[in-house]
């Protein structure tokens, strides 16, 4: 049974011009024209039998024609009704043994004078059923229902969605975190799921259940309490940082001695790592390690060495008279910067992990917790990491440290043992900013994420970039994404970025971005058969999205201790 049985008299009109992927249809009846809506679907007769072309109505116009002759007769049309259709795919009546198959390719082009029909009513339902059925085969990720037909479930191809990075964008409150939660809950249901969520505000804490694990980058309160990975507190000890990241943390670039300081840091870290390996009897690592290798070193010893160098005196030209060493007092600023960082309670997750975080196998335990899949660690393959207590100036450094860890582990896993992992980056503009907004800590983060965007696919490492400011997110990374979930966007700079990322042929499809409802999205990309408008289903467990009912709150009772509690918490650096 073919689903379309249009008769000529149902035609809207006929094709009057054909371009590569768009056609112009002349609509005979102006009443028909009035009913047409942009972004709805149209069907075109194909030049090949057994096929129909499917398009998206992208423009509807009525043009008044100036009469050619003053004495024009009554029959000459006084207006021209046009409808522009962006071709998006073909419906084949049969493909091998399968009936009614939709393909994203254009198997043929329509001919001039081909009939065009509006896709509505039962025809639309039948077509959407074909789409849903095809998309639901096997690897289906369900986001919600099509706005076009509220009974048709919108399935995405889960393989394709994660294969080549995805982007979720929309103004604040448009529904990105809820959409992410909807995706997470399905990922969590898979047997060997593996994904990390960067949760910057602790928004995803209500997402619980099988397959989901929560971690928090240790805050001052966790350090005081001596919490460990087993309690869900993770330390990301300084020795895991790359050399570049350590320099950006310790050396003030504006210091005139910065180049010397960076050089000495490199030399001394190398020495400190060597000592650690020698003391621990790790000869096999000692032969090949580099400054960026994840080898612990003792920071107190390093600091002693730096102090020695900073106060060093060497024999002078005349006997019995010494003089200041080459780097004497050139390290003072770096040393005090380093001391400040080490004692900064907010940076406890870097420097105050104690002996545990200095163990050689700490990295193994960290990797097991963060990068293990559901069936390996027996708990959750979806790991939500709360970064809410990480100070904003080091946030890019710390988030990208976890990203680098994931990338390195993937890279160093033999091909036959590799297991894919997705990094979901909420509030990505905060740590993967566009280059013109980046400072030195951002640069390090950008470099890592750009590398993942470009090479991650080969190693089974995927990014889902989530942001309310697409125009402030790094462009290289956005341009590597092949699936877009674009939610309501009100800012015109942000809209322009999304417009540029969508295929040209879709033309004005993105014009509806500012008018989308909360929880509604335009989904475009190879994971979705149709570029379509989808109403996202509510997730079972909803993120704390911080939507506060001002008017209502202002009419109700207030806890009289709230201010003193806040002041106290602020001082103690913990919400207790
Ligand atoms: N699919 C949905 N269905 C119904 N309501 C929704 C949906 N998605 C979001 N909402 C509503 O919108 C609010 C904000 O959603 P959400 O927290 O996901 O926004 P956001 O885009 O992540 O915003 P921000 O950029 O500020 O983090 C939710 O509290 C909820 O009330
Ligand atoms: Mg959010």
Image: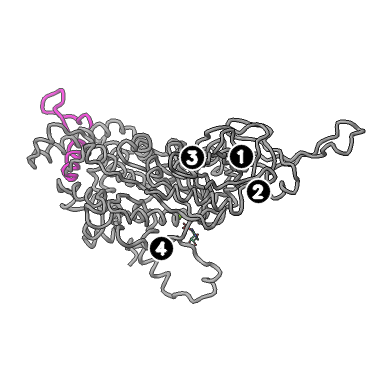
Q: Secondary structure at mark 2?
A: loop
Q: Residue at x 58, y 32 (%)?
A: 109
Q: Earlier in the sequence, mark 2 or mark 3?
A: 2
The residue at which mark 3 appears reads as 103
Q: Residues within 10 Å of mark 2 (few under 14, many from 20)?
A: some
Q: Secondary structure at mark 3?
A: strand
Residue contact at pointers 2 and 4, CB within 8 angstroms: no
Query: Which mark is on residue 44?
Result: 1
Q: Is residue 393 left or right of residue 215?
A: right
Foreground of the two, 130 or 226: 130
The residue at which mark 2 appears reads as 37
Q: Earlier in the sequence, mark 2 or mark 4?
A: 2
Q: Is mark 1 within 8 Å of ligand 1?
A: no
Q: Secondary structure at mark 1?
A: strand
Magenta segment boundaries in residue numbering: 298-327
Foreground of the two, 210 or 335: 210
Query: Which mark is on residue 540?
Result: 4
Q: Earlier in the sequence, mark 4 or mark 1?
A: 1
């Amino acid at each position: 049974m073919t689903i379309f049985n249009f008769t000529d008299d149902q035609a809207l009109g006929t094709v009057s011009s054909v371009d590569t992927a768009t056609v112009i249809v002349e609509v005979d009846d102006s009443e028909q024209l009035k009913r047409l809506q942009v972004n709805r679907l149209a069907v075109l007769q194909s030049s090949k039998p057994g096929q129909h072309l499917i398009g998206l109505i992208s423009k509807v116009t009525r043009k008044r024609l100036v009469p050619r002759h003053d004495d024009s007769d009554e029959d000459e049309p006084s207006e021209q009704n046009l409808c522009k259709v962006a071709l998006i795919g073909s419906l084949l009546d049969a493909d091998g043994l399968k009936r009614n198959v939709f393909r994203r390719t254009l198997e043929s082009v329509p001919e001039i004078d081909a009939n065009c029909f509006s896709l509505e009513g039962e025809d639309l339902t039948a077509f959407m059923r074909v789409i849903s059925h095809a998309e639901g085969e096997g690897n289906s990720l369900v986001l919600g229902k099509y706005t076009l037909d509220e009974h048709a479930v919108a399935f995405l191809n889960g393989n394709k969605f994660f294969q080549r990075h995805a982007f979720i964008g929309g103004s604040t409150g448009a529904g990105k975190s809820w959409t992410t939660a909807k995706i997470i809950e399905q990922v969590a249901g898979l047997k060997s799921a593996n994904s990390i969520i960067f949760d910057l505000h602790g928004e995803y804490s209500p997402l619980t259940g099988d397959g989901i694990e929560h971690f928090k980058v240790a805050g001052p309160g966790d350090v005081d309490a001596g919490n460990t990975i087993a309690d869900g507190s993770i330390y990301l000890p300084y020795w895991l940082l790359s050399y570049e990241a350590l320099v950006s943390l310790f050396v003030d670039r504006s210091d005139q001695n910065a180049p010397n300081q960076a050089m000495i840091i490199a030399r001394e870290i190398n020495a400190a790592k060597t000592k650690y390996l020698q003391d621990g009897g790790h000869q096999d690592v000692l032969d090949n390690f580099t400054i960026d290798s994840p080898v612990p070193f003792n920071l107190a010893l390093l600091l002693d060495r730096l102090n020695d160098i900073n106060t060093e005196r060497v024999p002078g030209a005349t006997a019995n008279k010494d003089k200041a060493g080459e780097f004497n007092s050139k390290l003072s600023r770096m040393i005090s910067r380093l001391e400040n960082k080490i004692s900064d309670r907010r940076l406890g997750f870097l420097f105050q992990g104690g002996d545990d975080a200095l163990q050689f196998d700490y990295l193994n335990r960290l990797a097991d917790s963060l990068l293990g899949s559901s069936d390996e660690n027996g708990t959750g393959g979806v790991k939500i990491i709360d970064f809410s207590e990480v100070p904003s100036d080091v946030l890019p450094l710390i988030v990208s440290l976890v990203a680098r860890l994931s990338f390195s582990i993937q890279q160093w896993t033999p091909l036959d043992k590799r297991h894919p992992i997705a990094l979901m980056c909420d509030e990505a503009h905060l740590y993967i900013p566009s280059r013109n907004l980046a400072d030195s800590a951002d640069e390090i983060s950008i470099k890592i994420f750009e590398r993942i965007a470009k090479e991650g696919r080969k190693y089974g490492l995927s990014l889902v970039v989530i942001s309310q400011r697409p125009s402030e997110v790094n462009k290289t990374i956005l341009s590597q994404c092949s699936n877009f979930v674009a939610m309501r966007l009100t800012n015109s700079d942000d809209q322009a970025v999304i417009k540029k990322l969508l295929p040209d042929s879709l033309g004005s499809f993105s014009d509806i971005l500012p008018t989308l409802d909360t929880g509604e999205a335009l989904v475009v990309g190879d994971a979705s058969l149709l570029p379509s408008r989808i109403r996202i289903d509510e997730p079972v467990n909803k993120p704390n999205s911080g939507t506060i009912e001002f008017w209502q709150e202002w009419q109700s009772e207030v806890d009289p201790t709230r201010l003193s509690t806040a002041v106290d918490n602020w001082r103690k650096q913990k919400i207790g």
